[in-house]
Every structure is written in structure tokens, then in C-alpha cells.
Image: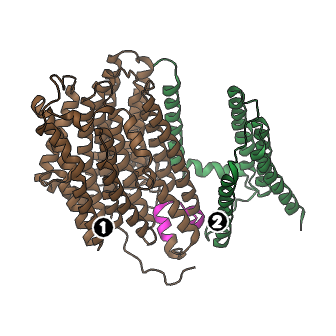
Chain colours: A brown, B green
Amino acid sequence: MNLDLTSTGDLARALLPELTLTAAGMLVLLVTAWRHTSGRDLRIAGWVTLTGLVAGGVAVWWLWWHTARAAGPPSMIAVDDFRFVTDGLFLAAAGLTVLVSFDYLEREGLLVPEYYVLLLFATLGMMLMAGGEDLMVVFLGLELMSVSVYVLAGIDRRSGAAAEAALKYFLLGAFASGFLLYGIALVYGATATTNLTQIAAQVRSLSLVQSPMLLIGLGLVLVGFGFKVAAVPFHMWAPDVYDGSPTPVTGYMATAVKAAAFAALFRVLVEAFGGVTAWKPIVWWLAVATMVVGNFIALAQHTVKRMLAYSSVAHAGYLLVAVAAASWAGSAALLAYLFAYTLVTLAAFALLAAQGREGERDVRIDDLAGLGQRRPWLALALAVCMLSLLGFPGTAGFIGKWYILVAATMAHENVLAAILVLTSVVSAGYYLPVIMAMYMKPQPFDQAHAGVRLGRPAAVVVAACVVGLLVLGVRPNPLLDLARSSAIVPPARAATPATGR
Amino acid sequence: MDGTRILFGGFAVLAIASAGLCITRRNPVASALWLVATLFSLAALFVLLDAQFIAVLQVLVYAGAIMVLFLFVIMLLNLGRAGPTDLKGPLGLGVGVLLAGLLLVQLLVLRQAGPAAGGPARATTEQGMIPTVARPLFTAYLVPFEITSLLLLAAIVGAVVLAKRKL
């Protein structure tokens, strides 16, 4: 199905998932305007949200099934499989987050149905950001996502830690948006366009590879995205924000927000700046610094939530390796890894939320001692999550890491591949103690785990994620085929212009 | 040198001078008023660059709406007294000068780079500025324009959620 994006009807068809989600957001907003007092109202809003997300998923699937492609001049929104697959990922992450939130919000007394409205708007922002074919759409999508997530981080107004998290996230996020916007302005100044494919064409035809304005702009764009994906040295906000936010929101931030930022970063770098080599060493160093610093600081953490926060920084480093490969294989590896990482991280944070006794911030790794005897299934699920995060064979995490390694070696980034393997070994130092505490230590006192409660919807999420991890770990072909067929093919490297400015 | 250039230079000097006064005044109300002066001078510069529509927007949105908001906040927070200076000793001054120098270098580099060829053609004045701004907004840039409205909605919902007295 070819869509002519200059005609209104085809544009609406290309934007069908986004329009569906917008309508769902408005609907939930109306529902919350009338009913917003009891736990039942909260559940109604949650189910409407879930329906909206499923409808959005159906719209994405419809476009994907008809192999929709854009025809005609370059436009604002990309119509390709990369967009559809990442959209599916964001929608799935949002849906699982809704299910985890059902019990959590009621248990913590957070009777704020607008939570679901903001979740929908954040997901919409991600879809626009990762599907944007124009820097303007990428930026607006990023802002829509960020503004919604800033509020979600601080939605628990009674908690000082949540207020701190929201304020830190907001201030640093606004700062990063400034960098990104300034970078976009300079890129526009150099190329006179904000469209990704046209930027690439202008860079070729005007031989702008050496243009200082373009390079400064590109650098600032990288800084802006670096903040959003929490790459070292722009990761300072991540641990405090992840630590202070409500746990389901943390899970959402660590998966969907990161996935959206990576998808947009990859698209921008490959489609617009594929001909500019200057960003490769920068991403290379970012990847190395993120892997090393993230993993080593995670070793020093005592609470599970902070450990998972630093672990998500480390995983951003692995994903940056896929970006640095900047090839078709890198794109496929990015998708496969994001998929595995989203499943495992959502399950891990859902399990952490179940530990909550007056806020699960203080759950130390030692507090999990004896969980294996008291709650065998819960402990098993958490153990599978830790092994998958570590990249243990037989889990989806292993397949993801393996695929990134293949992409890196194919792009002759052998040093990066070696550092990835070495830092993964280091990460065993903080994932395995969780398993050790659960199975090899006695519980400190009787009824130590009496407060652990996993609600039914959250249990469904955890079970689905864990089974998915194990199945994909043994039979990864469907996932890999999907990732391979949806990868962005970098435009053929045009002969590099001989004359710089 | 023709009259336009003299006017341009005059307003440019005015803009820079009032911007300088804006950041050096200790009284926040005085600072805000100098900022109004800066914004008006910028509007005049836009008129001289044949961008009347942007000039009108500048006066309406920035000098009008946003400045009123600034003054409101200043008065609500009751910042009547002059506070201590923001420059923290010689180190702060050094960092400030360094950043200013960096900005200057950047400006010089960008000046050398020059604008790109094939940029948007300068709108002719006969056509009238408003249609030239409005037409792309509802055709080529329809999608970003609509996303902006969603962004504002999300921001309003978020602000209400965080600020309302009773959850």
C-alpha cells in the first residue's frame, strides 16, 4: 500500500496509530473529568487506557500488514517497518505498565486517574519521536513524551523523593531539550531543511561534511539525545530519578523512554548524518564510558532499585554499541535488544513493586534473603530476570547481546565488542548476589516476606514477560526475523565529496 | 549609509544595552522592565528586516503576555528587597567571561560558515506576511502544528495534576 502523504486522506491513514491514541487520550481525559474519586474510577480509566493501547496496536498492525510505504516527496512522518515495530514496542511497554499500575496505585493510595492520560500522551510522544522523518516532529514528540513523564515521576505528591526526582528530571530534561533544539537550529542553518533525508541530500550536494555549523549542530543534537538515553557523562540524573519515581513509572522510563530515544537517535544519525563520519568516534566513546561507568557504579549499590537504575545505564552502553555499528545489522540488533531488554526490565520492576512495604525504595539486596523458600515462583521469576539482564544463555538477554556483538564485529568494532563482553562479566557481580540472597541465605526473621503482594494483573505481566524471555532465549528466530526485516537500511554510502569547505 | 542601517544600528545598541541593564539590576522589577525594552528593540529589528508578523508576535506574546506573567510571579513571590549579587567572587566572574568568550568565538565561526544556499526565499512584502506564515502552517507543517496542541494539552493536564489541592 503506497500512501501519498501530501493528500489528507493518506496522511490520516499513515498517522492512524497516533490518531487512535490521541482519541483514546481525550476519551480517558473525559472519563476522569467525571469519575475521579474512588479506586473503581481508577480501574475504569485503566481499562479504557488499555483498550486504547490495544486499538493503537491494531492500527499499527494494519499498516504493517498492508506494508504501507510513503510515496511522493519527503514528509514529516516515516512510513516503514522500523516505525511499526518500535511503535508496537512502545504500546506493549505502556500496556504492561498499565497492568502493573492497577494494584500499585491503589495500594499506595494514588487515586489520580490522570496518571493514565499522561501515560497515553507519553506513548504518543514516543511514537511520533521514533517515527519522525523531520527534526521538528522528532523534537515535538520528544517534548510531548518528556513533559508527560516529568509529571508521572512526581505524581506521588506526598513523597519527598518523588518531588526531588520530578524536579531533577524536569530541570535537566529542559536543559537537554535546549541543547537538542539549538543543535537542530544549527543543522537547519547549515542545510536549510529539517527533513532527515533532505539533510542527507544537502550534506552531499553542498559537501557540508566539514562545515563547522553542521558539526556543532550535530554535536549538540548528540548531547541532547545523550541526556535522554542516560549515556555517561550525561547520566547524572538517572539514578536519583529512577530511585525516587513510583516503581511502575520507573519501569516505564527505563524501557519505553529509553527505547524511544534510541530509536529516534538511530534514525537521525543514520538517515540524516549517514554521510558525516564525525559522530562515530563520539558515539564510540560514549558507549565505552557508559558501559564501564554504569557497570562499575552498579557494583557499589545496596538497594535493588538503585542497582537496577545503574544497570539500565549500563544497558544504554550496550545499545550504544549497536548505534556505533550504524549498519543494517546494528539496526536489527538494536531492535532485538530493545525488545528483550523491555521485557526483562518491566518484569524486574513489577517484581520490585511487589516487594513494597511503604515504598520499595529501601528494599536492599539482603532483604531478599530467603525469598526462594517463602515465595518460590516470585523468586524464580526474579532469578530469570537477573540472568536475562546478565545475558545468560537460554534467555532473551543472551540473544540480544549476541546479536549486538555480531553487529559490532561485522562493523570491525572489535574493541567495543571486547569491552561489551568484559563489562558484562563485571555485571555478574551485582546481578548474581540477588539470586544468591534469594536462594542461599535464610530469611532473617519469620514473616520477613509477609508483605510481598503481587496483584493478579501484575502477576500476568510478570508471567508473560518471563515466559517470553525463556521462549525467545530458546527459539529466537521469530524475533530475529522481525528485527532483520524491519531494520533501517543505511543509504548507500555515496562517494564522499572530495572537497571540503 | 542609509537611514535603515542607522535605525538598525540604533535599535541593536538599544537592545544590547537594555539586555545588559536587565542582568545587572538588583531589583527584579527593574530587570523585568529592562527586558521589556530589549524585546521592543528586537521587535523593531524584525520590522527593519521586513518581518512585520514576527515583530507583532514579539510584542504581543513576549512583551505582552510573558512579561505580565513574569511581573505577576515577581509580585507573588514578594521579591521586594534587592538580594545579593549573583557574581560569586573572582571565580564566578572568570567563568562568566570564559563563557562569553566562547559564545563570541562561536558567533565568529558561524559567521564564517554563512547561511546555506537554497534556503527559504525571503518573503516579499507585497504578498503580506501573515499568509506566508499561515499557509505552510496548515499545509506542509500541519503535523508538527497539531502535535504542538497536544503538547500544550499534556502540559496543562500535568500542571493541574501536580498543583490541584486535593487529589
The mark lying in front, picked from 2 and 1, is 1
Specify the subunit that label 2 lies on.
Answer: B
Tag 2 and tag 1 share a subunit? no
Residue at the image point whose x is 27% and y is 72% from the top: A414
Q: Secondary structure at mark 1?
A: helix
What range is drawn magenta here? A187-201
Residue A295 on the magenta span: no
The reply to whether residue A124 is visible in this rendering is yes
Residue on which the image places disc 2:
B106
Q: Residue furthest top?
A: A38
Residue at the image point whose x is 41% and y is 69% from the top: A280
Residue on which the image places disc 1:
A416
Q: Amino acid at mark 2?
A: Gln
In this orientation, which residue lies closer to the viewer: A83 or B88?
B88
Instruction: State the CA–CA distance, disc 2 to disc 1.
Output: 33 Å
Residue A268 placement (x, y as % from top left): 43, 60
Residue A208 placement (x, y as % from top left): 54, 74
Residue A388 placement (x, y as % from top left): 19, 49
Where's the C terminus of chain A, which quadrant? Answer: bottom right
Specify the subunit that label 1 lies on.
Answer: A
In this orientation, which residue lies closer to the viewer: A78 or A241?
A241
Q: Secondary structure at mark 2?
A: helix
> Image height check: is B158 above or below B58?
above
Residue at the image point whose x is 53% and y is 31% from the top: B156
- Density class for disc 2 (Cα within 10 Å; few <14, some 14-19, many ≥20) is some
The reply to whether residue A80 is visible in this rendering is no
- Marks 1 and 2: in contact by CB < 8 Å? no
